[in-house]
Amino acid sequence: MELSSLLQNILNGLAIGSVYAIFALGYTLIFSILGIINFAHGAVFTLGAYFTYTLISGQFENNGLLRGLNLFPNGSPLAGSAWGFALSALIGSLLAGVVGVIIERLAFRPMRTRGADPLLALVSSLGVALVIVNLIQILVGAESYSFPEGIYGDLPSALLFHLGDKVIIIRTVQVIIFAVSMVLLLILGLVIGRTRIGKALRAVAENPGTASLLGISVDRFIVITFFLAGLLGGLAGTLVGSSFGIAGPYFGVTYGLKGLAVIVLGGLGSIPGAVVGGLVIGLAEAFVPAEYSAYKEAVAFALLFIILLVRPQGLLGRAQIQKV
């Protein structure tokens, strides 16, 4: 492989892998606290993209109960500038975080209060995901929606770098996605590692009973965890939607499955593992030859299978020791 192609694939892989990482962190946060997988996380990913699209465009056509709706007859005040898009993405992610809290109240808290088997909570979250996805389809139809042009202001659509007689093309949106993802991962790492809230979250994850005895409100921090997970999922959906468009209500399903592959690959409950797993899968997909691009979706799971044969606890996970 030529050096220019190698660099091109690495940059492409880092961009999409960083999105996988922040999306998978939502899974990881909830799993580290409750020890279960939130299957509604993919639906929150989808909602985040739709929330941001609504704030930027406000137009839904063709099908659904909202067909023909135009929320901004004179144009959205948030459209046409990078700052407007950033504010829309922030609001959309916050709304997705609120949806995450609602999911916790509806699908997880009742099960936890009754001491139900964790498998029942998992099935309950799957049911909530199906309800959300079908509600989206009822409201706006199953059509694809693309973000309007100009959401990144006057920035060029692509950056060109010359390497000898070769040209490396990097889409501006890829640079923005990677930069936003890395900044967000850094902020989250500082919050979890350096703040009182982060220490309390780690205490709840380690032992909820002991944390409660120390005066930590376990229920409160579970709500905070679901809010952070929803915010991360919603932002990931917005970043993907701004790059590839919103491919209908079910477009979060594929990313939901990849998110599961990421956290298992990196190590269940490991935040650094989610980051590493996301970047590894993104890079693996980027190096799939163009003629085999139809099989790109299988790469994540093939890689997962191979690594787990060698290291069942994942790349950065710890082996579980059972006392008998």
Image (cartoon, rainbow, N blue to C red):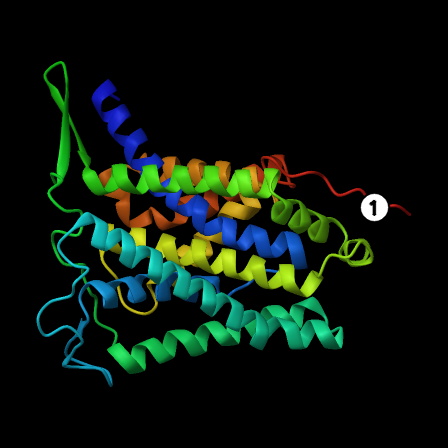
Q: Is residue 203 left or right of residue 103?
A: right
- Residue 87 shows up from this direction: yes
- Residue 179 pos. (x, y %): 33, 37
Q: Say what amino acid the circle numbered 1 marks.
A: Gln
Q: Is residue 187 above or below residue 249?
A: above
What residue is rendered at 66% in x and 55% in y? Answer: 33
Which residue shows up at 33% across the image and 48% down it? 295
- Please identify the quarter of the rendering in which residue 30 is found: bottom right
Q: Is residue 27 above or below residue 277?
A: below
The N terminus - image quarter: top left
Q: Is residue 123 left or right of residue 129?
A: right
Q: Residue furthest top?
A: 164
> Please, is residue 234 above or below residue 65 in the view?
above
Residue 67 is situated, as x and y percent measured from the top left of the image, at 18, 82
The residue where tag 1 is placed is 322
User: Residue drawn at (29%, 31%), measured in percent from left and top?
Assistant: 11
Can residue 306 be seen here? The reply is no
